[in-house]
Amino acid sequence: MKQPHDPSTITLAVDSNKANELVDMNDVTRVRHENGKLIAIGKGLANFNGFDTGIFLSTPALFEALERSAADQGDTSLSGGVRRLAGEGRVNVLGIDGRFWLDVDDPKALDKGERVLLTQLQDKPNDGPVSRYLNRPISVRISRTLSRFPITPNQISLLSFSGSLLAAVLFAIGGYPALAAGGVLAQFASIIDGCDGEVARIKFQESDYGRWFDAVLDRYADAFLLFGFTWHAFAGGAGSLVLFVGFLAIIGSFMLSYTADKYDRLMCHHFASGKGWRIGRDIRVFLIFLGALLNQPFATLSFIAALMNVETVRRVWISRDRE
């Protein structure tokens, strides 16, 4: 739509990647183009160098060509009108440069498209090891189902936060059954936390506000979870030292999140190449989950406090000379 065009012409988006595995060669419309102009188009075209994506920037010229094609040759198809304009040199070609597209004509093609999009969702360089190997494979399957309902990404963020809040309440109740149930619920909420962004991308509802809203709720969820864990340990007789350790765990978690934006921008190529792991919220919640199941809240808080604060200092040190 941004390309300059003559009102007497139309523009066709063309995929020149003849090795595109998503293309159904028995159904796709083939094209031949030269110097930005469409030369020929048709499903049975033998000599071709691209595929018709079905995406047009149309003008009234197309309807005039369709009328002439129907009157002269009895061809009422879209390709017939486009062929008429192509013969007059009035069809421009715009390469899509490897962008994702898929011709969806039946349930099989729809299923293929969903699977491709979901596979792309799992390829996030900034994912930590828990997100990559545990949370994401589960969340994308949940997101596939959620995307079929009129639920918004922000509503999913609130659902995940509610799960974390309930987990914190269970921690504070006391007793091992409540602790273990809270740990399981916290981990499940962490998995659901990945669904808001996935559904936003599947349904093309991504927004800066949605990302910010999710980050705000995550910080509240972290504080409630760690405070609930601290309260459980304190009420269980761990002593006043656990209050200080819990405070360090909360502060370390907040500072790790605060440094994430700059650190991720500096290290994005490092993560994309598969070098090292990103320590983030996924690891923190998973440690809470394990600590709850093993009934070791104080030891878990101590480890989280040390890990989060050491990682924050490491990030500050690494980032000092990088801009």
Image: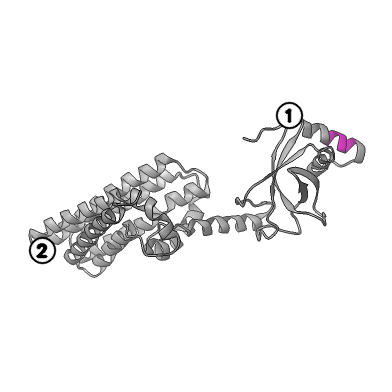
Query: Pointer 2: what residue?
Result: 238
- Residue kind at label 1, given as amino acid type: Pro
Q: Is residue 114 left or right of residue 322?
A: right
User: Dividing the picture into quarters, in which one does residue 176 lie?
Assistant: bottom left
**Helix, strand or loop for the magenta stretch, by majority:** helix
Neighbourhood count class around disc 2 (C-alpha, 10 Å): few under 14, some 14–19, many 20 upward: some
Find numbered disc 1 in the image and state the secondary structure of the residue it sits on.
loop
In percent of width and height, residue 250 lies at: 21, 53
Find numbered disc 2 in the image and state the secondary structure of the residue it sits on.
loop
Tell me the residue at 40%/39% (across/down).
209
In the displayed orientation, state which residue is furthest to the bottom: 294
Q: Earlier in the sequence, mark 1 or mark 2?
A: 1
Is residue 74 rendered magenta in the image?
no
Whole-Å distance between the Cαs marked 1 and 2?
Answer: 77 Å
Instruction: State the extent of the magenta-drawn residues as a range.
Output: 66-71
Q: Nearer the viewer, mark 1 or mark 2?
A: 1
Neighbourhood count class around disc 1 (C-alpha, 10 Å): few under 14, some 14–19, many 20 upward: few
Query: Pointer 1: what residue?
Result: 7
